[in-house]
Each structure stands twice: as structure tokens, then as C-alpha cells.
Amino acid sequence: MTTFDFLLQGLAVAMDPMILFYALIGVTLGTAVGVLPGIGPALTVALLLPVTYGLDPAGSLIMFAGIYYGGMYGGSTTSILLNTPGESASIVTALEGNKMARAGRGGPALATAAIGSFVAGLLATLALAFLAPYVVKLALVFGPREYFALMMLAFVTVSAAFGDSAMKGLTSLFVGLALALVGIDQLTGQARLSFGVPELLDGVEVTTLAVALFAIGEALFVASQGNTAADKIEAVKGSVWMSRADWARSWKPWLRGTAIGFPIGAMPAGGAEIGTLLSYATEKRLSKHPEEFGHGAIEGVAGPEAANNASAAGTLVPLLTLGLPTSATAAIMLAGFQQFGLQPGPLLFATSPKLVWGLISSLLVANVMLLVLNLPLIRLWVKLLTIPRHWLYAGILLFATLGTIGMNPSPVELGMLLLFGVMGFAMRLYGYPIAPVVVGLILGPMAEQQLRRALAISQGDWTTLVSTPVAAGILLLATLALVVPLIMRMRGKGAVLAQIASDED
């Protein structure tokens, strides 16, 4: 069967009324949380993991994907009208979008962001559909050595991509790997680090850890900041529709942003932030109106927003084909797959093709839903910005606790929720990234299993880990991904010190 046939089968699944309902819930929730500053799609998906425990797997995963796409859409509203990016990927949009809003052109800025997101999401989802089968064919030839090398690449790139310091990222990763050791050893059947607590024999629940780190930790961190002055919301003046000149200046940045964002999102060391920055720099260089940049250039909104949404589809390529998350939301979605007993990877396309292609096709439907939701209802989404922050986070705490109790009514589970929540607060306080902890807990057992298989096949010979060109190449790439950022950072510090010394002279 061709990719077109699979897509048509997936569309038949996606057009089911119940699946459409799940998709609508996802995109609506995603847009809402994208609009609210400080609450991202990763936090929302983490909160919903325990709630969807007993629901239909296909519907739940489609809802999660809708939240991911919707969060990327909604983040532009906060950036443009409030100059407060909800996520790091929306920082670049705020540079030009807020200037447009202050000049009374908030409507066209929001419109080009929404339409650019639609175009990018549509093209990138089609690219995902046509690229995924080729990645699956490549992954099917991988053995234990190659998979272990791939896990090492994922560990290093996730640790280096999140946070300001690679060392802090690696520290967070090792916390996750340590938590992954808790429970019964898969090969020997021996209990490890359970400390005589029966509830720990099954290991640490990914759902509990994700909810605690993302929701409880964030709520405690916001509470610790005290009362801050309310941000000024720029009113949406005039029409939200774009003029003919706006269309002429936006359509090329939409296409260029898609071309930049999708491959970067699909890379293990990618990320939406890199794509948006590259798109902004490209548009500034190619623009016929470079003098407008810094004062409200519409290209500076159209290109980065397209790159932002294209990268969201790009992150699903390694997640679905290899089981590797390249963003915080993708890590939580991986936990969602595992919650339903599914392991993303090449075999998922063979064992659950209906679910995978239904998920990919539903993203096309979700994009249309998001366009309909965003353009006519912009003023409604803006009203969400007036919700008092203490009400918002009190509701998050309540929802997180009830969800955990509903999934596993155990005092030990609630104790771990509180413990990990305090840990998440402390990590935010001292600048340690959260996502590598979750990635370490999810991928740690898989990496251990593949390592032990490779060593069993070679009778304990460690050189077997680099005995094939593919495994050696991936491990070399992982080493470069760790070393190169450190060298660049040291060079940057050296340049700053040299500048300071010259200024003193």
C-alpha cells in the first residue's frame, strides 16, 4: 500500500464523530493553554495523563496531539498582545508582533500568525506522512547496538538542548536514570531501590513524575514569586483581517518558515527555538523592508510562527518512528503511548497502523479546526488573559491531585507526587531543566535492556558497541553533540572576558 492509501485509511478513522470530538477538545484546550502565559502544552498533557487512563487510546493520543498543535497556535496571542511568550519558541514572535500591536496592527499580526500556523501545520503534517515510512524502513535494520547508540544520542541531545548549561541538563538526566532503576530488574527479577515499599516494585510511575514536575513544581514556583504587577494587554484594534499588502509580504515567509522548522524539529538535537531564530534571521536578511525590523515587520511574525508549528510536526517524526522525544511535550506524549501499552517505534506502524495513520490524518483535520477557532474567536481568547493567576494555579494543583488519586488511590503515590513536586520547584529555582528527568525515566529501562542484550550477544565484549559503522557513527554524533556546545560556550566566555579586559585598558 502507498502512503496515499494509508492516509485515506487514516482519514476514515479521523472522521469518526468520536475522534473528531476528541480532536476538538484537544485543539480547544491547546489554544486556551497556549494563550495563558506560563502554561504550556507539556503541562496540560501531563495533567490529562491520569484522566485519560481508562479512555480510548486513539482518541486520547489524538487529543494530546491536538493540544500540542493548539498550544503552538495560542502562544502567539500572548506574545503579540502581552509581550509575554508562553513558551521559549514564541519569544521571537514577541519581537515584532508586540510592536505591531502597539502600533494598532494587532489584528493583522494575529491573523498572519494563525494562517501561517495553518499553512505550516498542513505542509509539515504531509511531510511527516511521507517521510515516516522511510525512517521506519531504516530503523527496522537496527539491532541492540544501534538502538543503544540511538538512546545515547537522545540522552545527550535532550540534555544539551534544554536549559542554559549542558552540565545541568546531564544532572537532570541522571536523576531520571536513577529513578528508572527503581523496581524489579527486567532480566533477573530482583528488586532494586524499592526500600521494602511494595508500591515501588512496579517502579516510579511516569505519569506521577510528569504531573509533579510540570504541574505541582510550576504552581509552587509561581507562588514563590509573590504578587507581580499585571502585564498590560494591548487591545485588538480594528479588523483582524490582513490587507493585500500583508498577504503579499507573508506568504513567502510562511513557506520558508515551514522549510526551516520541519527538518530542525525532526532532528534529535533540534527544537522549535532554533527554527524560529533561523527563520527570523532569514526574513530579516531577505526582506525588502529591513528598516521595519525591530519596529513591527509582519515578516518577523509570519516566518517564525510558521517555523514554530512546522517544528511541532517535525518532532513527531522521531517520536513515532524511533520512540525518541525531542521536546518536553513529546516526552509526555511518549508517556501517554506507554500508558496504553504502546511503544512508539518502527514496529508500531506494523502492529497499530490504524492508530498511527489515524493520528497523522487527524492532525490535518485539527489544523482546519484551529484556523476556524483562532481567527473568528481572537477576542474571546484574549479574555482568558484576565483570569487571576492564583485561581489558575490553585485549579491546577487540585486537578493534578485528583487525577493522581483517580489513577492510583495510594498514599505512597500521593507522597511521591508531593516529593517530586518539591523537586520540580527546586529544579526551577536553581535553573535545572525538567524534561531530561522524564526522558531519563522513560528511555532509561530501554537503554539498559538494549545494552545488556548487546553485551550478552558479544559475551561481555564492550567493543561490540562500536563494531558496526551505524552504531559507531551515532555514538560519534552523540559525542559531538555534547562537546561542540561546550567548546562554543567556552569560546563565547573567552570573547566576553577579552572584551572586558580591553574595556578596562
Image: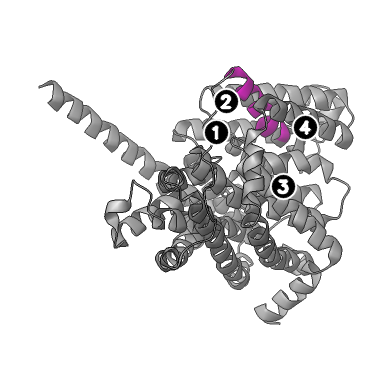
Callout 3 amino acid: Leu
Q: Quadrant of the N terminus?
A: bottom right
Label number found at residue 427 = 2
Q: Nearer the viewer, residue 137 or 181?
A: 137
Tell me, yes or no, if residue 130 can be seen here: yes
**How far separated are the C-alphas under marks 4 and 1?**
20 Å
Q: Is residue 222 magenta?
A: yes
Secondary structure at badge 2 equals helix
Q: Position of residue 134 (x, y in %)?
A: 59, 72
Q: Earlier in the sequence, mark 1 or mark 2?
A: 2
Q: Position of residue 246 (x, y in %)?
A: 43, 63
Label number found at residue 433 = 1
Q: Position of residue 292 (x, y in %)?
A: 31, 52
Q: Earlier in the sequence, mark 2 or mark 3?
A: 3
Residue occupied by mark 4:
400
Mark 3 residue crowding within 10 angstroms, few (<14) / some (14–19) / many (20+): many
Label number found at residue 29 = 3
Which residues lie in the magenta part?
211-226
